[in-house]
Image (cartoon, rainbow, N blue to C red):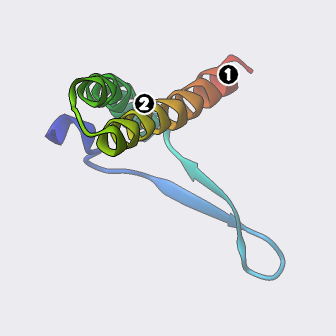
């Protein structure tokens, strides 16, 4: 659990002329921690989907499968976005 928490994250915020945040930037080490968390959440989502197939009430089955699928989808898309950005 503690391996998923960066010890000294460095976050910078770029602001526009009005002072509103337009871009948040983090250092590479912090992003590695976040990527590790995304992979773990993707693995956990598989367990949630599996549990959804094993329960009897239909509403609970659909809820668990939907939650597991949405966790996997969002974590996977965030992970792919960073991997593609690193290729540039």
In the displayed structure, 49 sits above or below 34; it is above
Give the residue at x 74% y 21%.
Answer: 88
Q: Mark 2 points at which residue?
A: 35
Give the residue at x 44% y 52%.
Answer: 10
Number of residue marks = 2
In three-dimensional space, the C-alpha distance between marks 1 and 2, rounded to whole angstroms, equals 13 Å
Give the residue at x 68% y 27%.
Answer: 85
> Residue 65: percent from the left, percent from the top?
39, 33
Q: Name the residue under label 1.
A: 84
> Residue 13: percent from the left, percent from the top?
61, 63
Identify the mark nearer the N-term, 1 or 2: 2
Of residues 49 and 41, the one nearer the viewer is 49
In the displayed structure, 57 sits above or below 43; it is below
> Residue 84: percent from the left, percent from the top?
67, 21
Residue located farthest toward the left when viewing the structure as drawn = 1
Q: Is mark 2 on a helix, strand or loop?
A: helix
Horizontal side of 35 relative to 15 (left or right) equals left
In the displayed structure, 69 sits above or below 63; it is above
Q: Is mark 1 on a helix, strand or loop?
A: helix
Give the residue at x 22% y 33%.
Answer: 56
């Amino acid at each position: 659990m503690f391996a998923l928490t960066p010890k000294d994250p460095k976050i910078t915020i770029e602001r526009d002329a009005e002072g509103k945040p337009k871009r948040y930037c983090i250092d590479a080490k912090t992003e590695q921690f976040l990527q590790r968390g995304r992979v773990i959440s993707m693995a956990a989502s598989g367990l949630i989907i599996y549990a959804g197939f094993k329960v009897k009430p239909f509403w609970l089955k659909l809820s668990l499968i939907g939650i597991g699928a949405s966790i996997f989808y969002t974590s996977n898309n965030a992970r792919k976005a960073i991997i593609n950005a690193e290729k540039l």
